[in-house]
Amino acid sequence: MAIADPMDAEMRQVDEVIHRRLTSNVALINQIGHYIVSAGGKRIRPRLVLLFAQALGFDGPQRFELAATVEFIHTATLLHDDVVDESSLRRGRQTANALFGNAASVLVGDFLYSRAFQMMVSVHKPRVLEVLADATNVIAEGEVLQLMNMHDPDLAVDDYLRVIRYKTAKLFEASARLGAVLADAPPALEEACADYGRSLGTAFQLVDDLLDYEGDTHALGKNVGDDLREGKPTLPLLLAMERATDDERAMIRGAIEHGETARLADIIAIVRRTGALQATREAARVEAEKARRSAMALPGNSGREALLELCVRSVERSS
Ligand code: GRG
């Protein structure tokens, strides 16, 4: 018998807000919105809002509104990202762009994004607006930086890390910070929460990038090898180039420069053989350990325990 997750009831309340706030008089918005939201997703960002609120003793209903808000922002970025990347599979289903077209995906992403702003305003806390306005701006910067780095086999690891801090870790940071803001935590404690989110988000994206080489399309719900097909220089490829033979390095460089489909299997095999995936997971473990240390600033309670457990689960995952 499966053990019930103590957060299940709380997450159901978030889902209730998500479905209520998804509603529009425009039929296509309802159709695409429900299509992507009902496919699930791990809901890790809303979980962070709730766990930080819980750890800091805040139990007002605003936590559900903000948890749903960050999931809407996340979902909007996925809709836009799948258009940019021309992805065809997400959450085990055809992407919205594959099914409904690019224009509909971008525009429904805009709906979710602007609905998220309506929701955050409803909480009546200027600091919440500041946190999310800053976060969404940085996410967009991260995506543009990533675009500029495409097809660059000489990308420095620090520049790769900057992209993942911006495009992914920033929303984790904001989610954690919002729990602290709701609880009116003192500035030093708010910063510790933000540090946790930033480190966990960095670890999460490192694993996301390694699963693109190690994972299984069925379990991941998205196509393995997409980053390589696009010529995206992520850490597994950068590390594989450092460790490969000259011929292999030349093959990987060519793949990044031109995008690769023909030698996809060979390059995946090189990445796996050189230990680049274990090294990427190790880098994720280092970030998760930073997150764990930041969480120790929280009072010792079940919320903190769940946040510590999340550090392990986010890194040792296979989907
Ligand atoms: C609309 C503010 C705004 C910006 C648009 C396109 C874009 C700029 C940003 C995209 C950022 C992006 C997609 C980052 C990757 C984040 C990531 C790790 C996605 C996968 O997250 P999971 O695994 O997904 O939590 P599920 O499906 O579980 O929800």
Image (cartoon, rainbow, N blue to C red):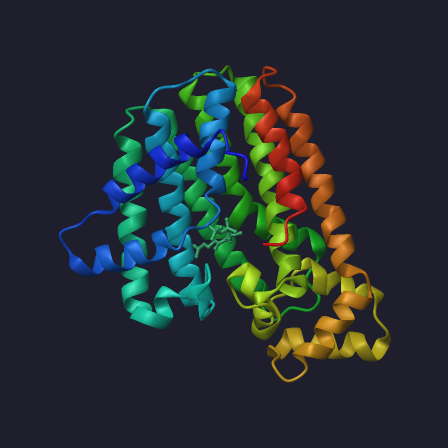
Q: Quadrant of the N terminus?
A: top right
Q: Which residue is drawn at 37% across and 72% down?
A: 98
Asked where in the image residue 95 lies, by quadrant, the reply is: bottom left
Q: Is residue 99 shown to the viewer in this render?
A: yes
Q: Furthest residue to the left? A: 25
Asked where in the image residue 245 lies, by quadrant, the reply is: bottom right
Where does residue 237 sit, x and y in percent of width and height? 71, 65
Q: Where in the figure is residue 128, as x and y percent of width and height? A: 37, 29
Query: 45 or 231, which lies in front?
Result: 45
Instruction: Say above or below: 200 vs 236.
Output: above
Image-based side of 143 in relation to 270, left or right: left
Residue found at x 17% / y 58%: 27
Which residue occupies the extreme front position in the image? Answer: 1
Extreme right residue here? 245
Q: How many marks?
A: 0
* Left or right: 4, with 225 as reference point: left
Task: Indicate the position of residue 10 as horizontal and vertical percent values.
Answer: 40, 30
The residue at the point 65 percent across, 54 percent down is 159
What residue occupies the far bottom of the structure in this picture?
262
